[in-house]
Image (spheres, rainbow, N blue to C red):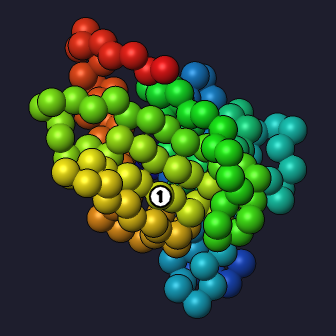
Amino acid sequence: MSRDAATQTASHCSCGSSLRWETRESYGERRALALCSNAACGLVTTASPDGVQPEQGLESFLLGQVPPRRYLQPWVRFYFKANQCGFVWRPYHEPCPTCDGEMTVQLGLPPLPERENDPYQVLLCLTCGATGMAWWLGERVTIAIDGDEWNEQSTAVLILKRVVEERAAMASEGWKWDFQ
């Protein structure tokens, strides 16, 4: 963002305080927004391009011509990111034990000698975010987490993200394994 004297059409808010203008430029388009310096007022003023409704001024300033995307839960974003990295999720045969949802999937991670501490199976409910992970550490060890732990980034979620990111990086460096 940069200040732009040309868009400073108004220098004072309706409350009498000064306005601080900022502009955004992209692909020949210039959008301007002003914030009232009075903390009690906080009015946002926009100088929108032609054709933009006043109630859409903030959206236009922030996004430009890009349509807004709907919010996706963190576990759903992880699911799509893993898919983009080449991981294949399969439907799981049981409903979610937490919400009884039918949108449960599993991800099998082949064991790698240099990555013995990685989970070999991940179960994920796309409805509520309940997640189960299984490791083979001489015996089967499993943990279960609920969807709230995706928002707070628990240790188990961080481990799962790290495993997927590092394995995807290994694959992009030419190291291949069977994603099936």
Secondary structure beneath label 1: strand
* Mark 1 lies on residue: 132
In the current view of this chain or complex, which residue is farthest to the bottom? 40
Q: Is residue 177 above or below residue 163?
A: above
Viewer can see residue 47: no
Q: Is residue 154 visible?
A: yes
Going by the numbered disc 1, the residue's amino acid type is Gly
Residue placed at 75% from the left, 59% from the top?
A: 101
* Quarter where residue 130 is shown: bottom right
Q: Nearer the viewer, residue 45 or 146?
A: 146
38 above or below 8? Answer: below
**Toward the viewer: 136 or 8?**
136
Residue at left offset 44%, top offset 35% = 108
Q: Residue lying furthest left in this view?
A: 114
**Could you tell whether 49 is left or right of 139 in the image?**
right
x and y percentages locating residue 168 in the rendered image: 33, 27
